[in-house]
Image (cartoon, grey):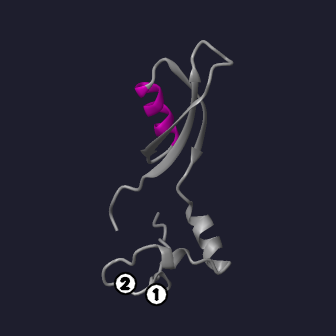
Amino acid sequence: MSGIWSNKFEIALRPLRERSGSQTVVVIETRTAAQATREATARFPEMKVVSVTRITPTVASIKAAQRAGSTYNNERPAAEGQTSAASAVVAPIRRVS
């Protein structure tokens, strides 16, 4: 499974020199929150980043929803050749030193 994972981040921005200025919210898709912050400041140099929030769910929240009986698996389209997410096996990676 090679590929680049990306997450969506919601970034709240305000004018750089006005503390009470109105906030603007943008959505940027990158791998990390730090990359999203850097990209937001590059796109909007006159704005300051106030907060960064991940929109996409984490693996832990997906597994918790599955344990709670959520229909998360039914809402996602199945990958070709895969009948359900429950049939996939995740093997731990052994550390070699």
Picture quadrant of residue 67: bottom right
What secondary structure is found at the residue carrying circle 2? loop
In the rendered image, residue 97, in percent from the top left (x then y), is placed at 47, 63
Q: Which residue is mark 2?
A: 82
Structural distance between the alpha carbons of marks 1 and 2: 8 Å
| Left or right: residue 22 compared with residue 47 | right
Residue found at the far top of this picture: 17
Disc 2: CA contacts within 10 A as few (<14), some (14-19) or many (>=20): few
In the rendered image, residue 12, in percent from the top left (x then y), is placed at 58, 34
| Left or right: residue 96 compared with residue 12 | left
Numbered circles on residues, count: 2
Residue range highlighted in magenta: 33-43
Q: Residue at x 42, y 26 (%)?
A: 42
What secondary structure is found at the residue carrying circle 1? helix
Labelled disc at residue 87: 1
Is 38 colored magenta in this rendering? yes
Q: Residue at x 46, y 87 (%)?
A: 87
